[in-house]
Amino acid sequence: MVNITRAADLSVVGANGGGWVAPVGTTSLESPLTQPPAPWEPLGAISDDGLTYGFDEDSQEFTPWGLTSPFRTQITKSVRTFGLTVWETSRVAVQSLQYRLDPGDLEPDGTGLTKYAETASPVPDRRAFWFLVVDGDAYKGFYVPQGEISERSDVTFKQDEMSGYEWTITTYPDEAGNTVYHVDKIPATPAYSGS
């Protein structure tokens, strides 16, 4: 009897997951089953919208004279982004990202107050990110060696709504030219043997 993996076993529902941040240069986890150790810091609770993995690409088509279909397409832009809304806005790691501050700048003073200012001239703030999507026994890990929050939404404070920081994180190439590394644990599938 041949054991054929069902299509449902090969699909992923983003039922759970998480996000972590660390300084640029922090190495990737070897397995999505491993709890990220220091210096990885958790981003805490993520809204039920989950994680969005975005593809922003442009291309140039080349159509020969006399033809109506292109015979070559050249990719001219290829950007990967991650989108999420974090709800634990009092976490130091989260505030550090939202306001582009060093985590040390968010230490409470002797009275227990945290004081900081937002600059009108922010500087680049690249960090390493680790994102995990979990669905039963399926795990999808995404390591971003260099990423930066490129878009922030408005923050709403009201009685019937959870305040959160909605971010788009743009990935940048590392020394090897890669922007995102994937480490997955998925159900085993039989090798295709043809017929």
Image: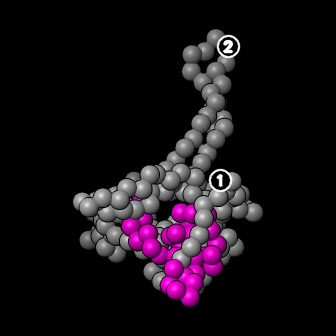
How many neighbours does mark 1 have within 10 angstroms: few (below 14), some (14-19), or many (20 or more)? few
Taking depth in this image into account, of 52 and 43 the one nearest to the observer is 43
The structure residue drawn at horizontal position 53% and vertical position 51%, both measured from the top left corner, is 151
The structure residue drawn at horizontal position 24% and vertical position 60%, both measured from the top left corner, is 160
Tally the marks.
Answer: 2
Circle 1 SS class: loop
**Residue linked to disc 1:** 120
Residue type, label 2: Trp
Residue 163 horizontal/vertical position (percent) = 36, 62
Residue 101 among those drawn in magenta = yes
Span highlighted in magenta in the image: 84-113
- Answer left or right for 64 relative to 48: right
Real-space Cα separation, disc 1 to disc 2, in angstroms: 52 Å
Residue 144 visible (yes or no):
no
Residue that protrudes farthest toward the front in the picture: 111
Residue 69 horizontal/vertical position (percent) = 56, 21
Residue that protrudes farthest toward the bottom in the picture: 110
Residue 151 visible (yes or no):
yes
Residue that protrudes farthest toward the right in the picture: 175
Above-or-below relation of 147 to 41: above
Residue type, label 1: Ala
Residue 180 horizontal/vertical position (percent) = 59, 61
The structure residue drawn at horizontal position 64% and vertical position 58%, both measured from the top left corner, is 119
Which-is-in-front pick, marks 1 and 2?
A: 1
Whether pointer 1 and pointer 2 mark residues with C-beta atoms closer than 8 Å, the reply is no
Quarter occupied by residue 161: bottom left
**Residue linked to disc 2:** 65
Taking depth in this image into account, of 1 and 102 the one nearest to the observer is 102
Residue 108 among those drawn in magenta = yes
